[in-house]
Amino acid sequence: TFVPNRQHKRIKKKKMAIKLVIVLALCAVVNAGVVVPAAAPVAVAPAAVAVEEYDPHPQYKYGYDVQDNLSGDSKGHVEERDGDVVRGEYSLIDSDGFRRVVTYTADPINGFNAVVRREPLVAPVVAAPAPVVRAAPVVAAPVAAAPVVRAAPLTVAAPVAPAFAYSRF
């Protein structure tokens, strides 16, 4: 059936208005929120509150040491605490072959302080001067002449026609 252009535009506008009304109705339903009647209040006995123990002067000491010959891992850590003062030291092997040793302290007056030392794993090797060695005298040996070999002449292959061709229709 033939529909004039003006009527076609009106039908499109009506369809769009219907879609808009449906979307707005869905938004209203989502935002409306479902009201659930509240249950009657139930009396609950107060739960026992666990009291955490507080140590006004905490003290501890710990340490570990790892020496793995298979992977080459070598590290350690020692730390101790006496009240608010913490002292410790840890060490590890850096990838550049140095051992890093960090000694640290922490207290409420000075805060956290660390001193880092780097120690080489092996002592530096001092090279001793090489002994002087005299070379043996060179004696000329008779040399046989090698045969002369000539290269084969160059040949050029004829151009090959392609197996298929493009054409425009």
Image: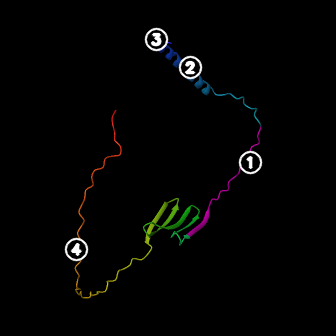
Q: Are marks 3 and 4 in contact (CB under 8 Å)?
A: no
Q: Main secondary structure of the magenta part?
A: loop
Residue 88 in the image, given as x and y percentages of width and height = 53, 66
- Mark 4 lies on a secondary structure that is loop
Q: Nearer the viewer, mark 3 or mark 1?
A: 3
Amino acid identity at mark 4: Val
Region in magenta: 43-65
Residue 44 lies in the magenta-colored region: yes
Category of crowding for the residue at label 2, using alpha-carbon neighbours closer than 10 angstroms: few (below 14), some (14–19), many (at least 20): few
Of pointers 1 and 2, the one earlier in the residue sequence: 2
Q: How is the image coloured?
A: rainbow
Residue 62, located in which quarter of the rendered image?
bottom right
Residue 26 in the image, given as x and y percentages of width and height = 59, 24
Of pointers 2 and 4, the one earlier in the residue sequence: 2
- Mark 1 lies on a secondary structure that is loop
Amino acid identity at mark 2: Val
Category of crowding for the residue at label 1, using alpha-carbon neighbours closer than 10 angstroms: few (below 14), some (14–19), many (at least 20): few
Q: Which mark is residue 48?
A: 1
Residue 167 versus residue 67: which sits nearer the camera? Answer: 167
Q: Could you give the CA–CA distance between mark 3 and mark 2, rounded to whole angstroms? A: 26 Å
- Mark 2 lies on a secondary structure that is helix
Q: Which residue is tagged 2?
A: 21
Residue 14 in the image, given as x and y percentages of width and height = 52, 15
Residue 169 in the image, given as x and y percentages of width and height = 34, 32
Q: Residue at x 56, y 23 (%)?
A: 23
Amino acid identity at mark 1: Ala
- Mark 3 lies on a secondary structure that is loop
Q: Which residue is tagged 4?
A: 148
Q: Which residue is tagged 3?
A: 4
